[in-house]
Amino acid sequence: EADIYQTPRYLVIGTGKKITLECSQTMGHDKMYWYQQDPGMELHLIHYSYGVNSTEKGDLSSESTVSRIRTEHFPLTLESARPSHTSQYLCASSEFAEGGFEKLFFGSGTQLSVL
Amino acid sequence: SQQGEEDPQALSIQEGENATMNCSYKTSINNLQWYRQNSGRGLVHLILIRSNEREKHSGRLRVTLDTSKKSSSLLITASRAADTASYFCATADRGSTLGRLYFGRGTQLTVWP
């Protein structure tokens, strides 16, 4: 198992609430990612970071925001949750594998349900 | 879409049988990776094959890559019930400086005891 942790594992909240999904890794990886995954669908990259104070939006438009104040910590925040945000959110970090290509390590995910 | 597409969407076999999953993609790639996801968990990296490689083995896993057809296959030999999971292929585009991986929808493999 990789040393990357997500909390909470499950979250059920009402519409309009502000939430923060936590992600921490102890591997010292500079690059970190947030993916969104719906059942039977591909993973969509919503945010990524190449290091402290570096954050970028991914391929899928998302109303969430992220911050990277410390290398090990990459939280995702929804200012006002809506039912359309219901999904599984996966955090990942990467290291260079053989040949200089990146290999991802994933957390266990947060299953978010917005009522 | 840049993502790979796995085929079949679902596969159900008996323990001891071999499982073959396929992945097709659209762009030129640097490498292709296969990941496994147990229900309710994150993805775990299984194997990486570079664009200049045609076949690679790791334990009971065998991956092939045909860049002319833009396709890859993952073979799991002598499957076990514990192999039950979703399997995703992920591609890294050639020329991309970001090293970003694009994932398909996955193949759901069920291995019956």
Image (tube, helix red, strand yellow):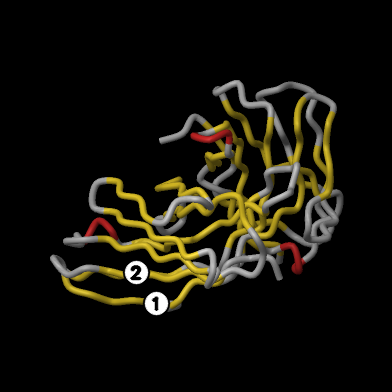
Q: Position of residue A41 (x, y in %)?
A: 59, 70
Assess disc 2: are there few (<14), some (14-19) or many (≥20) residues with their C-alpha within 10 Å of its C-alpha. Answer: many
Q: Give whichever of B91, B52 is nearer the camera.
A: B52
What is the quadrant of the C terminus of chain A in the image? bottom right
Q: Are marks 2 and 1 on the same chain?
A: yes
Residue at x-position 31% and y-position 56%: B62
Residue A35, percent across and down? 66, 52
The residue that appears at 40% across and 36% down in the rendered structure is A1
At x 57% / y 32%, what residue is drawn?
A96
Res A39 seen here: no
* On screen, residue A7 above or below A82: above
Q: Is residue A38 left or right of residue A105?
A: right
Is residue B86 rendered to the left or right of residue B111?
A: right
Q: Mark 1 falls on what kind of element?
A: strand
Quarter where residue A33 is shown: top right
Image coords of residue B34 (percent x, y): 46, 54
Residue nearer the viewer, A27 or A16: A27
Q: Are marks 2 and 1 in contact (CB under 8 Å)?
A: yes
Q: Is residue A67 above or below residue A15?
A: above
Q: Chain of mark 1?
A: B
Q: Which residue is mark 1?
A: B10
Residue B109, numbered label: 2
Amino acid, disc 1 = Ala
In the image, what residue type sits under mark 2?
Answer: Leu
Q: Nearer the viewer, residue B29 or A50?
A: B29
The chain letter for the residue carrying disc 2 is B
First-in-chain label (2 vs 1): 1
**What residue is rendered at 60% in x and 50% in y?**
B30
